Amino acid sequence: MQPFPKFCLALLLGDFPLQTSSVLEGKAKGSRAYLLHGGIHFLVLLLSIAAFSGRDWLGSLWFWIAAAVYIGLHLGIDRAYQGLVRIKKLPDSTSLFLID
Amino acid sequence: MSTIVVLVWFLTRPLWTRLKSEFAWSEATGERVLEAAVVYVAVVFAGGYWIRYLTSGLIAGIEKPGESPEQIKNAGMYRLAGTILGHNCDRGSISFHGGVDPDGKVDCTISGVEGTLRGVFLDRHFAEHRTRSPRWFGFGKTLVRDDIVEVSTVVPGFASS
């Protein structure tokens, strides 16, 4: 099974139903909310991989590297995006979400 | 539910391997479930976000006394949903972030959507939509799969009287 749909599912779940308004508000205040958001993404990704790929992937070093890169990149883009929207350099738009 | 699960487990005492095999799915089934989950989450959540973005232009500069900017922002989505579903739709069936439409802001109509409605709703529900909401009292006739059927909807309080 291809990894893309599993990462896609984890991203969508972590960014929409599992991103509460308190996390969203917390992102404007500090980095704790980002850590929580990253943790939720990581947990959802683990569950998604365990459910749809079996536990073989979880024993692979490449999976952990890919997961770390995914979480790091996502949080980095999220932080930059929130910062740019806050200082009104960029409008809140769908294209930014798609880039993310 | 948990009581039933515990009771069944206590009575049958299944082995872990047997329990695991009951819930195991083939790779093909797993792929289908994954695809369905991705499509569902993308349409319902990301799609909702996209609709709110698309309709944000419609509410620019609108000020309505007694309504917060957030309520007006949501109303844009209600109007779009109303355009898709038509005037006689059940307002409670339109979901938005945090629940259903409690203010009844969906109040738009467009002709020629009946065919689409029949594809979306069950015939019984469609008939109710054509008469009015199922929560309203009323009688009516509607065309369901080339048959005229009578539909009555009764307010729960009146049903027992």
Image: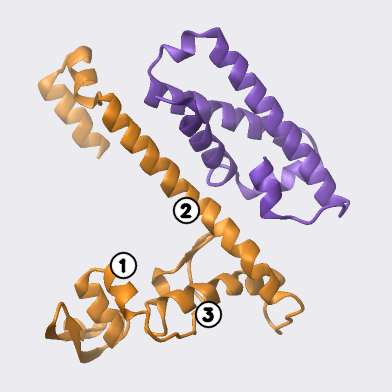
Chain colours: A purple, B orange
Q: Amino acid at mark 1?
A: Val
- Give the residue at x 77% y 43%: A81
Q: Position of residue B153 (x, y in %)?
A: 22, 83
Mark 1 surroundings within 10 Å by alpha-carbon count, few (fewer than 14), some (14 through 19), many (20 or more): few
- Does residue A80 sit above or below B130 in this rendering? above
Q: How many marks?
A: 3
Side of A43 where B93 appears, left or right:
left
Q: Amino acid at mark 3?
A: Lys
Q: Nearer the viewer, residue A93 or B71?
A: A93
Side of B157 where A1 appears, left or right:
right
Secondary element under disc 1, as helix, strand or loop, is helix
Tell me which label, 3 or 2, sits earlier in the chain: 2
Have a look at marks 2 and 1 and say if they share a chain.
yes
Q: Position of residue A3 (x, y in %)?
A: 48, 26
- Mark pair 3, 1: CA separation: 21 Å
The answer to which quarter of the image holds residue B89 is bottom left
- Determine which residue is flagged by label 1: B120
Mark 3 surroundings within 10 Å by alpha-carbon count, few (fewer than 14), some (14 through 19), many (20 or more): some
Quadrant of the image for the N terminus of chain A?
A: top left
- Determine which residue is flagged by label 2: B43
- Determine which residue is flagged by label 3: B105
Have a look at marks 3 and 1 and say if they share a chain.
yes
Tell me which label, 3 or 1, sits earlier in the chain: 3
